[in-house]
Image: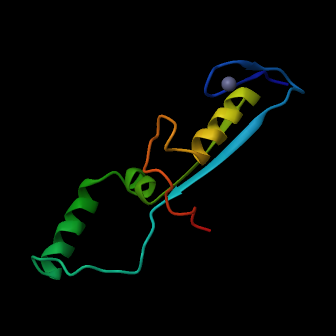
């Protein structure tokens, strides 16, 4: 079996060792509110179509939905979970006591 490495620290993860997988899905949210464009809907629609034509389809897809997995050692798993659950304390800082996680 091929030897694997922790994606974060690079530590070798021998076959049979304790390994963690963080499966991440990031997707665009929609709160149900459509704002009326100032320039009119026809103008906005034309702009959007031009942007789509000029953009890479894969990049557009990633802006809406992206899914990937991280292979982590125990130490990096602990840090990842802690920083994700308490982002106001880690490098990915956000406001303290944010709204609860969306279920
Ligand atoms: Zn690691």
Q: Tell me the quarter of the image containing the C terminus.
A: bottom right
Q: What percent of the width, then of the height, locates residue 93?
A: 44, 42
Furthest-front residue in this view: 97
Q: Vertical placement of 55 versus 83: above or below? A: below
Q: Residue at x 51, y 39 (%)?
A: 89
Q: Vertical placement of 8 versus 43: above or below? A: above
Q: Is residue 84 left or right of residue 17?
A: left
Furthest-left residue in this view: 39
Q: In which quarter of the view is residue 16 placed? A: top right
Of residues 14 and 99, the one nearer the viewer is: 99
Tally the marks. 0
Q: What percent of the width, then of the height, locates residue 68?
A: 60, 46
Q: Is residue 56 left or right of residue 43?
A: right
Q: What percent of the width, then of the height, locates residue 51?
A: 23, 60
Q: What percent of the width, then of the height, locates residue 49?
A: 23, 68
Q: Is residue 98 left or right of residue 6?
A: left
Q: Tell me the quarter of the image containing the N terminus.
A: top right
Q: In which quarter of the view is residue 70 placed? A: top right
Figure coloring: rainbow
Q: Residue at x 58, y 39 (%)?
A: 83
Q: Residue at x 49, y 44 (%)?
A: 88
Location of ligand 1 given as a quarter of the image: top right
Q: Vertical placement of 61 versus 5: above or below? A: below
Of residues 19 and 96, the one nearer the viewer is: 96
């Amino acid at each position: 079996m091929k030897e694997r490495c922790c994606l974060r620290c690079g530590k070798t993860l021998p076959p049979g060792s304790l390994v963690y997988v963080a499966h991440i899905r990031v997707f665009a949210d929609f709160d149900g509110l459509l704002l009326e464009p100032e320039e009119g809907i026809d103008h906005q629609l034309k702009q959007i179509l031009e942007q789509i034509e000029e953009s890479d389809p894969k990049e557009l897809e990633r802006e809406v939905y992206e899914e990937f997995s991280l292979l982590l050692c125990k130490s990096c798993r602990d840090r990842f979970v802690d920083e994700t659950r308490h982002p106001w304390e880690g490098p990915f800082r956000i406001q303290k006591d944010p709204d609860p996680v969306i279920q």
